[in-house]
Image: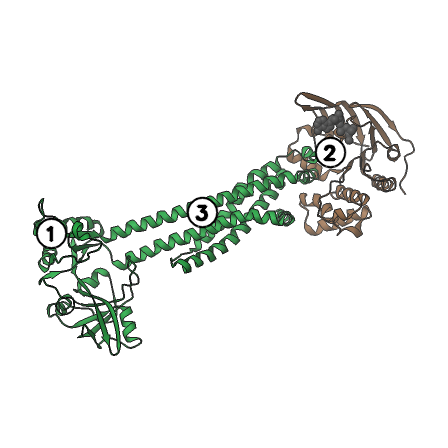
Chain colours: A green, B brown
């Protein structure tokens, strides 16, 4: 009942100074709104990276042919064919921390089905590839050891390719032409989405590595392979696997003081984990910057409440003269401050949700508004009201009845 | 008749840093239950200071104030607030009503702090407004009322919690003669119903309503006289 009375008084006081109350609330509106938008962007970004990590598969290192310095590992994905089938076999046999090795080769080609055609990535793989990538089939079967050994003309379609060429038709069992060579579609892969580099992982066709090299991509150097995906036996042996692979390859390629490394090893999970960490740091920083505006908003509340207490000193005196206790006055002003911040918080929350949606539409960033963020910002705005309203309220409650009454 | 108020050698010093103002220099008197007492005296003689102490709004520098035989000096702020709320009603020269608030809400205010339930609160507030003849103005905002009406709302507010004593500091100071008489009639009537009234005034016409007149001079009681034939209300 007492709270109800305080609410009534507070509402009346806020209504009496509509413009001022609104401007004061604006600080909280902007603060909460900014916090929501920033956290939404930040958690959207780290969620995106987390999804990508999951889409890559776990405990993976990648061995890329070509020298890091001369070829430039960033540009030349397959600068020189320095890795061989023998290297693959050696790694399989001699590295105890390695569970699976999946050699690959990449190229681009036109895929034709009926009168439809589509330019896409052609990737030669072995059965280990889908295992390492934890990539499941939605139809048909995967590629087998026999496909690779026999260099059979079987292929798997990524979801984008399947949808583009076949629409609603079932592709399994149909024949597509890749560089005019007929291939039988034996399976369709589930959707993977964007890669960490931002390209569509489902826009690809997968062939047995041997077939791809001989018929589609072609290589002047027989017995070579492109990049290798290597999975360690467990997460804590990832580093060790990396070491085993590079020392084995160093030895096999006779790398030494006179010969520079003709391959490079990359730990994908590590790279992604780092970028996820930086996304989290960014989201934290953004949140912190946004909280500063909330702090400024809170100071605005305190400022206006102090003005309000001074303006209404006589009213406080009258209330005390007819029996208001300190507690009553404290509660009255605290209620007023909290009401302002809660109003501001709710409006800010709505604006934040709208803002986050607009940002994600406009810039194409994913945003993620967790329900916790909403609850927390609600509690936070209430907390700001209590924190910044307390000092003015206590000042009001501490007034001497007679001094307050005499105040001009 | 029992003593409601007893003042013993009350002094009050306002310390303004370099200057010390001795507003009360040792005031002693007692007021019995049901009395109608007027306090007179020149401006600056300490009347208001004394009233604020009587009203538990201020504390004396020294001396003792017994209210219904309880020494007020030993009470906490909360206890004083409770006394102001339930035992005393204070009427000011400047009315001291809340602006932008209806007459009824003003009268309800002491009942809110007394935690009286909403229904009972409204009933008692209307009853109090009725006693001052303003029941028909309950819904008016205080700034829409005349000075006399505002003072009557203030009296109704002081009555709301059914106090034993009403303290009025120059209640007619801002009012014309006719309105002043109306207010004094109300006080007479309330006194007739058994409520103790202490009223400050410097107008002999108003003091004529009281049954006893104390005159202050320079912070001391100069005289304390009975009025054998107080003016009666209509
Ligand atoms: N708050 C105050 N601070 C300082 N001096 C005051 C204060 N209130 C009253 N006084 C002084 O105390 C004396 C008595 O004042 P007051 O009780 O208001 O007299 P009265 O009501 O009889 O006119 C005066 O000299 C006045 O100036
Ligand atoms: Mg005075």
Which mark is first along the chain, 3 or 1? 1
Find the distance from the CA under tag 3 to the CA under tag 2.
Answer: 51 Å
Discs 3 and 2 carry the same chain letter: no
Residue A195, disc: none
Find the distance from the CA under tag 1 to the CA under tag 3.
Answer: 50 Å
Q: Are marks 2 and 1 in contact (CB under 8 Å)?
A: no
Residue B55, disc: 2
Q: Are marks 3 and 2 in contact (CB under 8 Å)?
A: no
Q: Is residue A30 visible?
A: yes
Give the crowd class for mark 3: few <14, some 14-19, many >=20 residues within 10 Å. Answer: many
Residue A290, disc: 3
Report the image quarter containing ligand 1. top right
Find the distance from the CA under tag 2 to the CA under tag 1.
Answer: 98 Å
Give the crowd class for mark 1: few <14, some 14-19, many >=20 residues within 10 Å. Answer: many
User: In the image, is B129 to the left or to the right of A61?
Assistant: right
Front residue of A384/A62: it is: A62
Image quadrant of residue B9? Answer: top right
Q: Residue at x 46, y 56 (%)?
A: A355
Q: Nearer the viewer, mark 3 or mark 2?
A: 3
Residue A249, disc: 1
Front residue of B57/A61: it is: A61
Image quadrant holding the C terminus of chain A, namely top right
Discs 1 and 3 carry the same chain letter: yes
**Image position of A229 with respect to A152: above or below:** above
Look at the numbered disc 1 and give the secondary structure of its residue. Answer: helix
Residue A221 is situated, as x and y percent measured from the top left of the image, at 9, 62
Q: What is the chain letter for disc 1?
A: A
**Image position of B83 with respect to A356: above or below:** above
């Amino acid at each position: 009942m007492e709270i109800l009375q305080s609410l009534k008084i507070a509402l009346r006081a806020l209504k009496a100074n509509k413009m001022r109350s609104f401007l004061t609330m604006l600080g909280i509106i902007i603060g909460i709104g900014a916090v929501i938008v920033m956290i939404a962007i930040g958690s959207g970004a780290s969620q995106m990276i987390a999804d990508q990590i999951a889409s890559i598969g776990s405990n993976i290192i990648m061995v890329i042919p070509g020298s890091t310095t001369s070829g430039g590992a960033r540009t030349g994905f397959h600068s020189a064919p320095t890795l061989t089938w023998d290297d693959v076999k050696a790694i399989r046999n001699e590295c105890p921390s390695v569970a699976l090795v999946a050699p690959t080769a990449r190229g681009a080609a036109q895929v034709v089905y009926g009168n439809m055609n589509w330019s896409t990535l052609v990737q030669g793989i072995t059965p280990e590839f889908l295992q390492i990538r934890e990539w499941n089939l939605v139809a048909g079967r995967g590629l087998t050891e026999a496909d690779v050994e026999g260099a059979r003309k079987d292929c798997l379609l990524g979801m984008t390719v399947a949808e583009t060429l076949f629409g609603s038709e079932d592709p399994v069992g149909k024949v597509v032409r890749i560089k005019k060579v007929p291939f039988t579609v034996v399976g369709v892969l589930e959707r993977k989405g964007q890669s960490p580099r931002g390209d569509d992982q489902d826009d690809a066709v997968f062939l047995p590595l041997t077939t791809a090299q001989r018929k589609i991509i072609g290589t002047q150097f027989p017995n070579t392979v492109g990049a290798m995906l290597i999975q360690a036996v467990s997460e804590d042996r990832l580093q060790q696997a990396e070491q085993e692979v590079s020392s084995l390859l160093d030895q096999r390629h006779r790398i030494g003081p006179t010969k520079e490394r003709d391959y490079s090893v990359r730990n994908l999970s590590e790279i992604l984990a780092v970028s996820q960490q930086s996304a989290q740091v960014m989201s934290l920083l953004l949140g912190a910057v946004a909280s500063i505006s909330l702090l400024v908003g809170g100071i605005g509340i305190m400022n206006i409440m102090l003005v309000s207490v001074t303006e209404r000193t006589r009213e406080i005196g009258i209330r005390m003269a007819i029996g208001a206790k300190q507690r009553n006055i404290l509660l009255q002003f605290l209620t007023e401050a909290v009401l302002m911040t809660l109003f501001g918080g709710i409006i800010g929350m709505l604006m934040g949700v709208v803002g986050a949606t607009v940002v994600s539409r406009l810039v194409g960033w994913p945003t993620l508004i967790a329900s916790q963020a909403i609850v927390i910002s609600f509690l936070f705005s209430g907390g700001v009201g209590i924190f910044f309203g307390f000092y003015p309220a206590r000042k009001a409650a501490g007034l001497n009845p007679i001094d307050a009454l005499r105040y001009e | 008749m029992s003593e409601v108020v007893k003042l013993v050698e009350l002094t009050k010093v306002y310390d303004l840093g370099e200057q010390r103002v001795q507003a009360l220099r040792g005031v002693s008197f007692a007021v019995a239950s049901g009395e109608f007492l007027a306090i007179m005296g020149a401006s600056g003689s300490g009347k208001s200071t004394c009233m604020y102490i009587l009203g538990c709004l201020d504390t004396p520098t020294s001396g003792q104030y017994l209210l219904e035989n309880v020494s007020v000096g030993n009470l906490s702020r909360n206890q004083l607030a409770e006394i102001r709320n339930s035992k005393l009603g204070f009427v000011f020269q400047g009315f001291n009503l809340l602006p932008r608030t209806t007459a009824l809400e003003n009268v309800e205010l002491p009942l809110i702090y007394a935690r009286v339930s909403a229904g009972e609160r409204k009933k008692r507030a209307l009853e109090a407004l009725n006693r001052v003849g303003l029941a028909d103005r309950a819904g008016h905002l205080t700034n829409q009322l005349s000075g006399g009406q505002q003072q009557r709302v203030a009296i109704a507010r002081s009555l709301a919690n059914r106090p034993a004593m009403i303290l009025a500091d120059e209640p007619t100071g801002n009012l014309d003669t006719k309105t002043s008489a109306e207010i004094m009639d109300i006080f007479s009537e309330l006194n007739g119903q058994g409520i103790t009234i202490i009223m400050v005034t410097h107008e002999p016409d108003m003091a004529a309503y009281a049954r006893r007149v104390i005159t202050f001079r320079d912070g001391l009681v100069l005289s304390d006289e009975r009025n054998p034939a107080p003016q009666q209300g209509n």
